[in-house]
Image (cartoon, grey):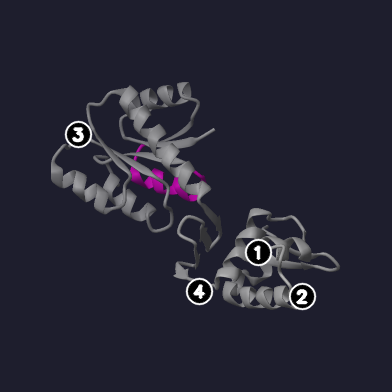
Amino acid sequence: MPKILIVDDEEKIRGLIKKYALYEHMEADEASNGYEAIEAVQKNHYDCIIMDIMMPYCDGYTATKRIREFSDTPILMLSAKGEEYDRIHGFEMDIDDYVVKPFSMQELMMRIKAILKRTQNAQKNTFTYKGLVVNYSAHTVEIDGERAHLSPKEYDLLTYLIKNKNIALSREQCISVVWGYDFFGDDRTLDTHIKTLRKNLKEYADCIVTVRGVGYRFETE
């Protein structure tokens, strides 16, 4: 069940959004200002944040800027301001959508669900483990924000291990999938690629575990 955070200083608005969210089978937490929102995102996982702009103590822009320092959780911004500048300023801060008050609750729910759907589709095309990010669509691997330069076979080997993570894969399975059934080499070719792959994965090298007498396993905590 998706979990959202509703950030607004008006209790009635928070309550109304939460009521509709529950009806749409979403869990919902509330925060009455930006400080509470930052604290909540630090402690909990949310699939989407609904962020009002005009709030006391800490406004939506300030909270969004702070949250973006440690989280890429989608943010839908609410505001009584409808000027183009305000919308552009919000998108420059990497928000995902913008709704001007007053708004239709049905439209708001549709926008939230659209964000959730985009996020879910993006997650299907990527694998993330701490600072290791594999983008299957782009065929890229990043480690703590930096591109890792893998050979095509190293990439294919890594993605095969990841897609079967926590499962011991035999040497024969790895060779047949990555090199093909007509491969005429030996196990040393696989071992050499594993060694180089571990080197390229840096601090994530230990994720590739040698299973004695069997082959290899990609292991996550």
Q: Secondary structure at mark 3?
A: loop
Badge 2 vs badge 1, beta-carbon distance below 8 Å: no
Report which residue position mark 3 lands on.
80
Q: Which mark is residue 178?
A: 1
Residue at horizontal 64%, vertical 59%?
A: 160
Give the quarter of the image for residue 98.
top left
Q: Which residues are magenta?
A: 32-46
Residue at coordinates 55% horizontally, 60% vertically from top-left? 130
Count of numbered marks: 4
The three-letter amino acid code for the residue at tag 3 is Ala
State the CA–CA distance, disc 3 to disc 2: 67 Å
Q: Secondary structure at mark 1?
A: helix
Please tell me in which quadrant of the rendered image residue 129 appears: bottom right
The mark that comes first in sequence, 3 or 4, is 3
Q: Main secondary structure of the magenta part?
A: helix
Q: Residue at x 44, y 48 (%)?
A: 39
Picture coordinates of residue 90, whole percent (x, y): 25, 47
Q: Residues within 10 Å of mark 2 (few under 14, many from 20)?
A: few
Q: Is residue 202 left or right of residue 119?
A: right
- 170 vs 203: above or below: above
Q: Amino acid at mark 2?
A: Asp
Which structural element holds mark 2?
Answer: loop
User: Three-letter amino acid code at disc 1?
Assistant: Val
Mark 4 lies on residue: 149
Disc nearer the start of the sequence (4/2) = 4
In the rendered image, the quadrant that contains the N terminus is: top right
| Marked residue nearer the N-terminal end (2 or 1) | 1
Image position of 147 with respect to 137: above or below: below
In space, the residues marked 4 and 2 are separated at their CA atoms by: 25 Å
Q: Which of the two discs, 1 and 3, labels the residue nearer the N terminus?
A: 3
